[in-house]
Image (cartoon, coloured by chain):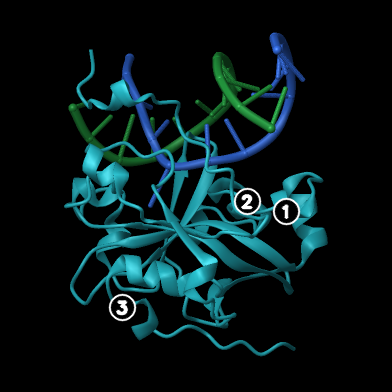
Chain colours: A cyan, B green, C blue
Amino acid sequence: MLQFDPLTRECLTGETLDVTRRLLGQRLVRRIDGALLIGRIVEAEAYGGPEDSTSHALRGPAGRAAGMFGPVGRAYIYLIYGVYSCLNVVAHPAGGVGAVLLRALAPEVGLERMRVLRGGVVPHLLASGPGRLCKALSIDRSLDGVDLLDPDGPLFLAAGVDLPDEAVTAGPRVGVVGRPGDIAHPWRLYVADDPNVSPGRRPKMNHKDTKTTKS
DNA sequence: GGATCGATCGGCT
DNA sequence: GCCGATCGATCCG
């Protein structure tokens, strides 16, 4: 039986962007039917509280993102486009609001099972996007709110490798809508040379289109 | 390789 | 009703 070094609550307590940086290189472990599916985090995005106009927390603690206001280290999982699940790690300063969207993993353990779940794609596409990641690890909203610091649970974070700053690149977050200043924040962090990083697809937008008012 | 488009659900306006 | 923190099939070059 493998031993895991779970992440600590203080590791996830702090400015959400700092926690995002810390999460790169760490492992996400899924326990399912006695099997283990494991990947190293290679891409993630920081989302803040109501002051971040791109954040689900915008609607306040009674909204769908209530989990972002709650204790650090829990999972916040939502359904996007009625089709795909997305996994966030709740992370913020004490008494704050925020979460980290996990966008891509480098699969390490359980590749066969992941391929079945994903439908036979090549390894570097297994978890190269937030929806793909959840599908590869069989994550959906039934896991919303689970404690990601519990190494006996169905889904948790474990220590991986520490990455040097040179390996980490920052860029604008993918697919978000909000105030131009917030959209421009380079709060997507990823391992530059890793083939598992998502394409970073984004709605087509030319620079004249940046006004937020519609028609 | 890159652009376009439909799928499909929940929580808002 | 509307529209997303997306993906993959399909079409074009």
- Using the image, determine if residue A148 lies above or below residue C11: below
Host chain of mark 1: A
**Direction from residue A76 to residue A161 in the image, left or right:** right
Gap in angstroms between the C-alphas marked 3 and 2: 26 Å
Asked if residue A147 can be seen in this view, the reply is no
x, y percentage for residue A113? 79, 59
What residue is at 49 percent from the left and 35 percent from the top? A82
- Using the image, determine if residue C8 lies above or below residue A140: above
Q: Amino acid at mark 2?
A: Ser
**Direction from residue A29 to residue B13 in the image, left or right:** left
Give the labeled residue for mark 2: A128
Host chain of mark 2: A
Q: Amino acid at mark 3?
A: Thr
What residue is at 33 percent from the left and 65 percent from the top? A17
What residue is at 54 percent from the left and 53 percent from the top? A140
Q: Amino acid at mark 1?
A: His
Give the labeled residue for mark 3: A13
- Crowd class of label 3 (few under 14; some 14 to 19; many from 20; radius 10 Å): many
- Helix, strand or loop at mark 2: loop
- Crowd class of label 2 (few under 14; some 14 to 19; many from 20; radius 10 Å): many
Query: Which of these two is toward me, B13 or A5?
Result: A5
x, y percentage for residue A197? 60, 53
Residues at circles 2 and 1 in contact by the CB criterion of under 8 Å = yes
Q: Nearer the viewer, mark 3 or mark 1?
A: 1
Q: Are marks 3 and 2 on the same chain?
A: yes
- Helix, strand or loop at mark 3: loop
- Using the image, determine if residue A57 lies above or below residue C6: below
Numbered label tally:
3
What residue is at 27 percent from the left and 57 percent from the top? A66
- Specify the quadrant that holds the N terminus of chain A: bottom right
Give the labeled residue for mark 1: A124
